[in-house]
Amino acid sequence: MPKKTKIDYQLLFIILALLGFGLAMLYSASTVESFENYGTTTRYIFHQMLYGAGLGLVLMTIFSKIDYHIWQKLLPILILISLVLLALVKAPGIGFSSGGATRWIHLGPLFFQPAELAKLAVVLYLAAWAAKKQKPDQGFVFGILPSLVIVGLYAVLILWQPDFGTMGILIATSAIMLFLSGMSLKHFFSLFLAGTAAIVLLIKYEPYRYQRFLNFLNPGVDPQGSGYQINQALLAIGAGGLWGYGYGLSRQKYNYLPEPMGDSIFAIISEELGFIRASMVLVLFLLLFFKGYKIAKNAPDRFGKMAAVGIVAWITLQAMINIGSMIGILPLTGVPLPFFSYGSSSLLITLSAMGILLNISRQAK
C-alpha cells in the first residue's frame, strides 16, 4: 500500500498543545527557584526550551519523516547504547548524583538521563519482538523469556540508580505490551503475581519507599516529615479551588512545596489555574490516548501497532501516575509529568517518540 505523506494534524495539535501548556506552566513554577539559584527568573525555562523543546521538535520533525521500520534495523544499536548509558551513570567522573540518586550522565555542560532513552528502547524492542512472533503464544521459554530477560536487565539497571518510579513505569508499560501481543492469561497472571510480590518486597525492605506507602495510607501521620510533600501538594490543590489564584500567583512555589517545577508541578497548576482549568491537562492526555489507540488500530503492520501502543501507554500511564500521586490516590513515585516537568532529557525523548508516532499515523490504513 502506498505510504501516506500527509501529517496527522489532530495528533500534531495535541502534541503542540501539551508542549505549549507545559512550557507556560513550567515558567511559572520555576521562577522562584531560578531567581534564588541564578538571579534571574528565566534560567530553567530557557534551558528547557533550548535543550528539551528545541532539540526535541527538531528530532520529532526528522523522525516523523523517517519510515518507522528503520527502528527494527537499528534496534540492536539502540539497545546497546541505552544499556551502556545506564551503566555509565555509576562511572566516576561521568555520573551525576542529586537527592541521593545517580541518574544522570554529566559531560561538560550537558546532562542526560539515560532512563528516559531506556523507556523508548524497551517499547521499540517489545514491538519488534511482537512483530516476529509466529504464534500468539509460543510457550514461556521460547516465546516470553527472552523479552523478560531484556526488560529485567533494564529494570535492574534503573533500580540500581535508584529510580523506583521509572522502573515501575517501564515494567507496567512492558506488561501492557506483552498482554496485548497475545500472551496467554496463565502466563500473564503468573508474571503479574510474581511482579507484585517483587514490588511489595522492594517497598517493604527500603525504608523511604515503605514510609511513602505509609504516608499514602495516612497522609497526616507525619505532616512535617515524611508526609510533608504530599500534604503541601494537597494544600496547593485545595487552595486552588475551582478557578485558582491566577497564573503566576502560586504560594506553594515559594519554598513550601518540594519539587514545584519537577514531580509536583501538577499541584502548582491546580493552585494557579484551579480544578476546572487544570482538568485540561487530563483532557489533553486522554485525547493523546484515544488518538494513539486509533493510530495503533489502523497501523499497517504489527510492529507499527505495538510501537504505537507502547508509546501511548508509556506517556499516558506516566501522566496518570504523576497526577494520581499528587491528588493522593496513588503513592508518591517521583516520576515527572510528561511535557510539563522540568527535565530536558524527558522532553527530548518524549518528543522523539511523538515523531515516531506521527510517522506511524502517516502510514495508517
Image (cartoon, rainbow, N blue to C red):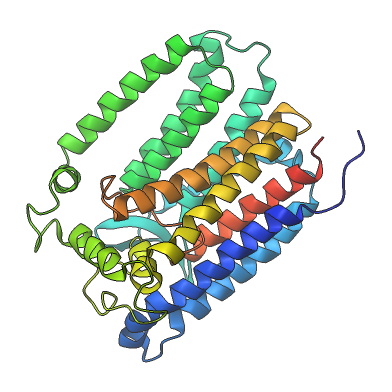
In-front residue for pair 24/108:
24
State whether residue 70 appears in this view: yes
Q: Work out whether residue 18 or residue 352 is closer to the camera in this orientation and state it.
A: 18
Q: Residue furthest right?
A: 2
Q: Is 27 placed left or right of 333 in the picture?
A: right
* Residue 181 in the image: above or below residue 223: above
Q: Percent from the top left, x then y, of residue 147?
A: 52, 25
Q: Is residue 118 visible?
A: no
Q: Position of residue 36 (x, y in %)?
A: 30, 86
Q: Nearer the viewer, residue 289 or 361?
A: 289
Residue closest to the far bottom: 39
- Residue at screen point 50% across, 60% down: 280
Report the quarter where the C terminus lies: top right
Residue farthest front in this picture? 242
The spot of residue 67 in percent (x, y) is 79, 44
Quarter of the rendering occupied by the N terminus: top right
- Residue 101, horizontal then vertical, whole percent: 29, 56
Q: Is residue 52 left or right of residue 279?
A: right
Q: Where, by quadrant of the figure, is residue 15 drawn?
A: bottom right
Question: Would you place residue 14 above or below residue 83 in this image?
Answer: below
Report the residue at 76% width, 52% height from top.
8
Pick the front one: 170 or 305: 305
* Total residue callouts: 0
Residue 196 vs 250, above or below: the answer is above
Q: Residue at x 10, y 60 (%)?
A: 223
Residue drawn at x 53%, y 52% is 285
